[in-house]
Amino acid sequence: MRLIVLNCCESARINVGDRFGNPAIGLMKTGWLPAVVAMQFPITDGAAISMSEGFYAALAGNRPIDDALTLARKFIQEKSRVEWGIPVLYMRSSDGRIFDVEAQQPLATPAEAARLSKEMLQQRRDAFM
């Protein structure tokens, strides 16, 4: 396992005095996990979906994980001006590369991804599956 994404509210919230209060830090303290992405505050479903679209597209394009989170935040910012700072990254990798994806694919910008038709998205999903 190279990455855990805790796509749930407050999974990166720091609770002073509660040693079980931050699952992201708890996972990183195990020492074997290169990266954890978590949410500092409550996040809407729409922002979480936008984050996932940008984040996983960047990882599939062989981008470093910190770049992937930056792109994910830009996807969130297209729909919400306040939630873009909620996802946080805990990382042990010095260069941000935790995966080695063989074939690079061009990344869609947030505007291009929003223009994809339902049929095109279904075709991409079917091809992926």
Image (cartoon, rainbow, N blue to C red):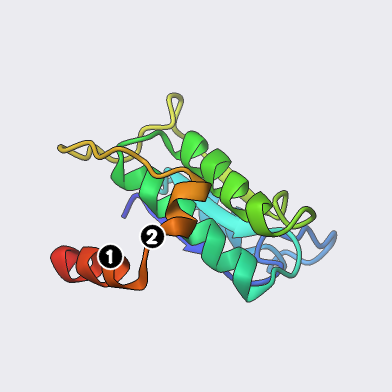
Quarter location, residue 103: top left
Quadrant that contains the C terminus: bottom left
Give whichever of 65, 1 is nearer the camera.
65
Quarter location, residue 51: bottom right
Q: Residue at x 61, y 47 (%)?
A: 73
Give whichever of 78, 16 is nearer the camera.
78
Mark 2–mark 1 CB contact (< 8 Å): yes
Q: Amino acid at mark 2?
A: Leu
**Residue 7 visible in image:** yes
Above/below status of 96 relative to 72: above
Distance from label 2 to label 1 (Cα)? 6 Å
Badge 1: residue crowd in 10 Å (few <14, some 14–19, many ≥20): few
Q: Amino acid at mark 1?
A: Met
- Secondary structure at numbered mark 1: helix
Q: Position of residue 97 (x, y in %)?
A: 36, 32
Horizontal relation, residue 46 to residue 85: left or right: left
Q: Residue at x 42, y 43 (%)?
A: 34
Q: Position of residue 109 (x, y in %)?
A: 47, 43
Q: Which residue is mark 1?
A: 120
Q: Which residue is mark 2?
A: 116
Horizontal relation, residue 51 to residue 118: left or right: right
Q: Position of residue 63 (x, y in %)?
A: 37, 35
Above/below status of 109 relative to 19: above
Give whichever of 113, 80 is nearer the camera.
113
Quadrant that contains the N terminus: bottom left
Badge 2: residue crowd in 10 Å (few <14, some 14–19, many ≥20): few
Horizontal relation, residue 90 to residue 9: left or right: left
Above/below status of 93 relative to 74: above
- Secondary structure at numbered mark 2: loop
Give whichever of 99, 79 is nearer the camera.
79
**Residue 29 visible in image:** no
